[in-house]
């Protein structure tokens, strides 16, 4: 009689390591949309301003 046994592995990821990339992306995105928008350089401000408008994000 032929019997085959399947092996399975379970990979456990710590919850802190699981959400760290998401939190980092959210913070970076918030800085780019909100923080850079208040920069004094007109070029940087206008680029952030146009980006906010393209996402229908109210800015004034």
Image: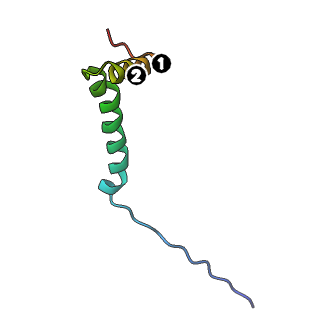
Is residue 16 shown above or below 40? below
Q: How is the image coloured?
A: rainbow
Could you give the CA–CA distance between mark 2 and mark 1, rounded to whole angstroms? 11 Å
- Residue found 28% across the figure and 22% down from its top: 41
Q: Secondary structure at mark 1?
A: helix
Q: Nearer the viewer, residue 6 or 58?
A: 58
Residue under circle 2? 47
Q: Position of residue 3 (x, y in %)?
A: 69, 86
The local crowd at label 2, few if under 14, some if 14 to 19, many if 20 or more residues have their Cα within 10 Å, is few
Is residue 26 shown above or below 50? below
Q: Nearer the viewer, residue 15 or 25?
A: 25
Q: Farthest right residue?
A: 1
- Residue found 37% across the figure and 13% down from its top: 58
- Residue found 34% across the figure and 24% down from its top: 44
Taking the image as shown, residue 4 lies to the left or right of residue 10, namely: right
The numbered mark, 2 or 1, whose residue comes first in the sequence reads: 2
Q: Nearer the viewer, residue 49 or 15?
A: 49
Q: Position of residue 46 (x, y in %)?
A: 37, 18
Residue under circle 1? 54
Q: Secondary structure at mark 2?
A: helix
Q: Quadrant of residue 23?
A: top left
The local crowd at label 1, few if under 14, some if 14 to 19, many if 20 or more residues have their Cα within 10 Å, is few
Q: Nearer the viewer, residue 17 or 27?
A: 27
- Position of the N terminus, as image quadrant, is bottom right
């Amino acid at each position: 009689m032929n019997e085959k046994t399947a092996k399975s592995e379970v990979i456990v990821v710590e919850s802190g390591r699981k959400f760290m990339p998401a939190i980092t992306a959210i913070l970076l995105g918030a800085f780019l949309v909100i923080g850079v928008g208040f920069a004094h350089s007109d070029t940087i401000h206008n680029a952030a301003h146009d980006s906010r408008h393209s996402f229908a994000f109210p800015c004034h």
